[in-house]
Image: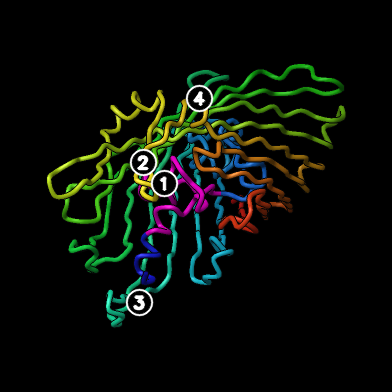
Amino acid sequence: MNRTLLLLIASLFILFPTTTKAQVGITGVPFLQIEADSRGAGMGNTGVALADNAAALFWNPAGLAYQKDNQASFTHSNWLANFGVNDLFYDYLVVKQYIEGIGTVGGHITFLNLGEQLNTTEGGEEGARFNSYEFAIGLSYGTEVSKNLALGGGARLIYSSLASGIQVGGQKINPGSSVGIDISALYKSDPFDFGSSDAIASFGVNLSNLGPGIQYSDNAQKDPLPTVLRFGPAINFGLDEDRINELTVAVDITKIMARQEAIVTEDDTTFRAVAPLKALIESWGTYRPFDPNTGTRTSVSLMEQFMIGAGLEYWYDRKFAIRGGYYYESPDNGDREFITFGAGLRYNQFGVDFSYIKTLESQSPLANTLRFSILLNY
């Protein structure tokens, strides 16, 4: 198989190991699911109930409502390093700005580079070279409904150029584009006594990337966006009266809210995205995905469709942080399982974070993934 087709496959399965079952082929542009900052990634992919920095645009835009400062952040990762391909990388740039009388707004650019490819025919003849990449650009905003509850939302333009102009299976591959929106909420409790200090509990929910499917070819096939429901709690408390030592515990539960339906004709069977609102309803039941390897369908129960991340974060004097976490998916629904580690430093208006993934399954493409983030408060 030539490298063009390999990259097309990798772009669809980019988040999932080769043993994936239910997740394979459900959505296009899965780069939108890549965790956008090293802090959340180091805490087991959690952040929906935290959302207290610029990365709230990814985790929960409602968190912008409680932020009254300005910040820029940039995250970089050499993606899928275990594949041994050096030209795959992920970048995320986000800026938030507080505007008096309006609130805090934020903008982001997400970019996934899939490298330069050489088009090779079935007969082994070399063709033209081309670049494969995907990106999204968007804006988000959060507003306080009360001192304890905030609502937020966002919208992004999505563009995916995997193999533009190349013929695959008699179909010309075109760039795909779409629009996705986010709808979110964040609840924060009043401070309450917790041991020798006080604590704040929070709960967040975010429905992200809700929008029409994305299409690459001239046929009827259209892949749904990676619409994700993310929700969960968090608690932050001091380990001493002066809060020199702080601990945060967070849990995120996520679920893919996208579905495909088969279009059967006399000549072929293709798949297209179920309408977004219809998919939100159909997602709350047993899913029977088609396995292209065996030509059969398996049943994935509702509970197996939930993915769980849990994380801890320890701060010393708000200057140095150590993080850890755990992430789990059912073997029939992605089969990712790994532990994460991370650390962070803050000095005046500057900050840096990093995270590391240690996979628990063998030969996972996510093994040894490193992310680095830099932050600037201005």
Query: In percent of the image, x 38 and y 39: which residue is there?
Result: 209
Residue displayed at 18% across by 41% down: 264
Specify few, some or many for label 3: CA neighbours under 10 Å numbering under 14, 14-19, or 20 or more: some
> In percent of the image, x 36 and y 61: which residue is there?
8
- Magenta range: 9-36
- How would you rate the neighbour count of disc 2 (Cα within 10 Å): few for under 14, some for 14-19, many for 20 or more? few
Mark found first going from the N terminus, 1 or 4: 1
State the separation of the CA atoms marked 1 and 3. 25 Å
| Residue 171 showing in the rendered view | yes
Q: Nearer the viewer, residue 133 or 245?
A: 133
Residue occupied by mark 3 = 118
Q: Which residue is mark 1?
A: 24
Type of residue at label 1? Answer: Val
Q: Is residue 84 within the magenta segment? A: no
Q: Which residue is mark 2?
A: 296
Q: Nearer the viewer, mark 2 or mark 3?
A: 2
| Callout 1: SS | loop
Is 64 on the left-hand or right-hand side of 353? left
Q: Position of residue 153 (x, y in %)?
A: 41, 33
